[in-house]
Image: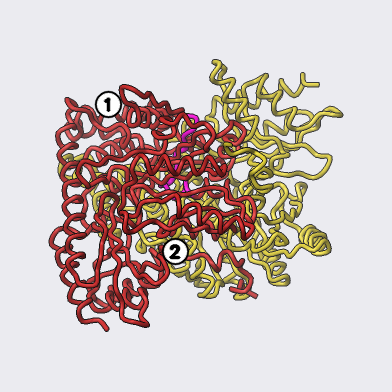
Chain colours: A yellow, B red
């Protein structure tokens, strides 16, 4: 008899991943039948017209095929050629051999320098150890590795924000752990509150859950929030009190739009507090920021305050899958070590980078303002990341899932219902990206407003 | 308190992956201190001097940076440019966007055509459905996806060959399932016997294990064996009888060296037998064969006789990790749709391909013969794959792990003890690749012979 559904585990059957769920399937079906669909369901910048950075692609091309430097000497700027030499020397065998399980050492060294430089200032020197860095196929694989390590029994719970990015809920379910949701405070720009953390922890503990870790997404997905230094320090103190590890999803660290604000990393605040007792797993990616290279699957995980014998276990688990893809590893290298002023590629790199970030900031502002003008909508400012997560008032008896399906069928706009991320009882939201280009995003806001006015 | 070893799950702690275990760590340590190491522990062809195929790399380079076609029009043959056009059209957004969770559709269609063509003959037409194909980051990720699906409880057992490739044992342990080892018949060229399958199944069943699936590696890793059509038919009949799924690891399908023999796929024999009751997961990769592109992490999984509701579950699980890396997906496309006679790239492609395969065949023969000449060694013919797995006679009280460590320290040759793969009680083996280039492989055999003569 072939394999049947009844033979699969509860965990497999219970796993849900809304970002690619039934509404997206419906969108693809409509598209096949000739409808124009605007995909706002997923942070996939290049699918909505964002261009890759020229420098990154030139380096990747030449690293794949080094003899192009002889065949077409004029086609590559000198710094591209120099960087490829460094890559070929550093990797020893180019892009075609397995690397160490942790990833190429020269790339991990560059990541460590990047973190140290990002987080240090004249007063505080933050260090980073290349041996505590793992190169991963996108950040998702790093998050999964950390959760694999932390969920040791079916009583183990992981605290996740509500709303959260469903990678977390899906992976926790699949690995047989328990989700311990803590509410973000929508009215305070989706920040974390000690009260909500305490409440979630107490509820879980009294029901017998052994809480192991706390996940934070900063800048926020789907919320678009940006955490302050003090909010992060509060989370670290809470984690210390309860011996929790922290998973800090910092893939949107370059996507900060609100003026005067800046991204602050968990690593930085850990160093500031000289905190040695809280284990930290932090994640970064080439898929977001201004690179938007989702398809290349480059990312890294940095761990802190992890004893060497646990580090050895992480390395062992990584080795079962051999290594992250090498083009992705190289892209991580280029992300953390981009051209510098004076390099031949600096000007085009800087111009492209600024152009993308300015455009994203413009759309973030336009989208939040536009949604807030719709009666029945309320949207927090989009301080960072790539999403809006507005509250919507729905007619009695209707769900956000009904709403998003109707929106798709009526307008061709594909967004993800708030249910897929979690939301306070009695509220309704959806997540939309800020990624459609200028003309399309105006259309998106206009169509949503018309749809909302007419929908019953 | 930071995370401690005692908080990790039994499954994590128990997972072992010998191919990158303590002997490899020792080798790296010796290398850092200046010793020359010959890494025969892992099938990583390009780290031992194998060159990537020019056509594949040219296409990947141009797909990363399409405007090189204008900047350096003479640097790319016309068929490379045409193929890149097809890729850019088929992928819609190039290499920088997430694809469907299953992988790019035009690549899956090309894989389906490849399978159909590979397995059909004038009498029997074998079909393959692109919707039953998943593109994966190397074959390892496909194997892990299948095992994730099949291990539903801690009573679930997976039959694996002894010796096996430790990806299987590691993943089964990590996912909380049970290994049900069945012995391969060394004296019959490491083939499968019905008797050994029956015995393993009976032993597991009587101890309360619910056997779910049977893994077969063909051509064999670490054994170098090649299964006959009848051996495969026997396995399928056995699986049918016990309602088992089959995992067919066919990543070495291009690596067949014994004259007159040919690779036969499980899909082909399933079709021959018109078998609709046995679920099959088969795996292929860009890492082995003559491409040897381990670092690019391209691979696919094809499933057969899987009902649509189970297929939907596989797709859902794949979607949590978003998609396989796009350069790897493109490399799968190139693997299944290489240049054809008459194309501008045909001649160099064919010359490079033949050169690599002839060299591997030569080394397989040389290595097996050389090892067999050492008193106390016995090595089956290397019919396929990239490894020798000789039996060695050891002095009383010594283990294969002692032996391999001493061999490393004495000669700089890094091989993996048989214990890491499993072996019959009272026997000792190790796995070595056939990959070192001609001059080095002679040195390897010579040094092993000298070492073996002197070791006590």
Q: Quadrant of residue A337?
A: bottom left
Horizontal side, residue A216 vs residue B189: left or right: right
Label 1 lies in what chain? B
**What residue sits right under mark 1 in the picture?**
B82
Bounds of the magenta segment: B130-143
Residue found 60% across the figure and 47% down from its top? A384
Q: Residue at x 45, y 46 (%)?
A: A297
Residue B390 sits above or below residue B95 on the image: below
Queried whether the magenta region covers residue B134, the answer comes back as yes
- Label 1 residue SS: helix
Q: Please tell me which residue is depicted at 32% across the width and 67% down the height of the picture.
A: B430
Q: Residue furthest top?
A: A34
Q: For this view, does B360 lie left or right of residue A157?
A: left
| Residue A390 horizontal/vertical position (percent) | 72, 37
Residue B218 lies left or right of residue A125; in this view the side is left
Residue wearing tag 2:
B17
Q: Nearer the viewer, residue A140 or A175?
A: A175
């Amino acid at each position: 008899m072939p394999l049947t559904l009844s033979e699969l585990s509860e965990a497999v059957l219970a796993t849900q991943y809304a970002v690619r769920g039934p509404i997206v399937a419906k969108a693809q079906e409509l598209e096949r039948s000739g409808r124009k669909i605007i995909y706002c369901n997923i942070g996939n910048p290049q699918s909505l017209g964002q261009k890759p950075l020229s420098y990154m692609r030139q380096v990747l091309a030449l690293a794949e095929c080094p003899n192009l430097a002889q065949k077409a000497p004029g086609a590559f700027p000198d710094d591209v050629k120099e960087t490829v030499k460094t890559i070929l020397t550093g990797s020893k065998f180019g892009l075609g051999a397995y690397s160490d399980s942790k990833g190429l050492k020269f790339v991990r060294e560059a990541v460590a320098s990047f973190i140290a430089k990002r987080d240090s200032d004249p007063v505080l020197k933050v260090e980073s150890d290349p041996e505590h860095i793992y190169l991963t196929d996108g950040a998702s694989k790093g998050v999964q590795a950390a959760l694999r390590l932390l969920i040791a029994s079916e009583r183990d719970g992981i605290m996740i924000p509500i709303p959260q990015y469903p990678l977390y809920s899906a992976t926790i379910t699949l690995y047989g752990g328990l989700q311990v949701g803590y509410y973000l405070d929508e009215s305070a720009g989706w920040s974390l509150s000690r009260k909500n953390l305490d409440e979630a922890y107490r509820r879980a503990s009294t029901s017998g859950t052994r809480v192991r870790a706390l996940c934070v997404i900063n800048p926020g997905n789907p919320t678009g929030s940006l955490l302050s230094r003090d909010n992060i320090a509060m989370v670290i103190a809470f984690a210390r009190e309860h011996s929790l590890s922290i998973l800090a999803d910092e893939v949107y660290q370059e996507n900060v739009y609100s003026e005067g604000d800046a991204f602050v990393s968990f690593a930085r605040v850990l160093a500031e507090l000289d905190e040695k007792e809280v284990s930290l797993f932090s994640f970064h990616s080439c898929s977001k920021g201004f690179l938007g290279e989702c398809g290349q699957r480059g990312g890294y995980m940095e761990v802190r305050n992890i004893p060497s014998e646990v580090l050895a276990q992480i390395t062992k688990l990584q080795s079962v899958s051999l290594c992250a893809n090498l083009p992705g590893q190289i892209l991580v290298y280029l992300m953390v070590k981009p051209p510098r002023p004076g390099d031949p590629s600096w000007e085009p790199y800087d111009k492209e980078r600024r152009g993308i970030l300015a455009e994203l900031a413009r759309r973030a502002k336009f989208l939040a303002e536009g949604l807030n003008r719709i009666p029945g909508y309320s949207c927090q400012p989009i301080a960072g990341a790539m999403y809006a997560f507005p509250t919507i008032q729905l007619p009695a008896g209707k769900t956000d899932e009904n709403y998003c399906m109707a929106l798709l069928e009526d307008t061709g706009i594909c967004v993800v219902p708030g249910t897929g991320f979690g939301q306070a009882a009695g509220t309704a939201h959806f997540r939309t990206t800020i990624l459609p280009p200028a003309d399309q995003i105006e259309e998106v806001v206009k169509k949503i407003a018309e749809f909302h006015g007419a929908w019953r």
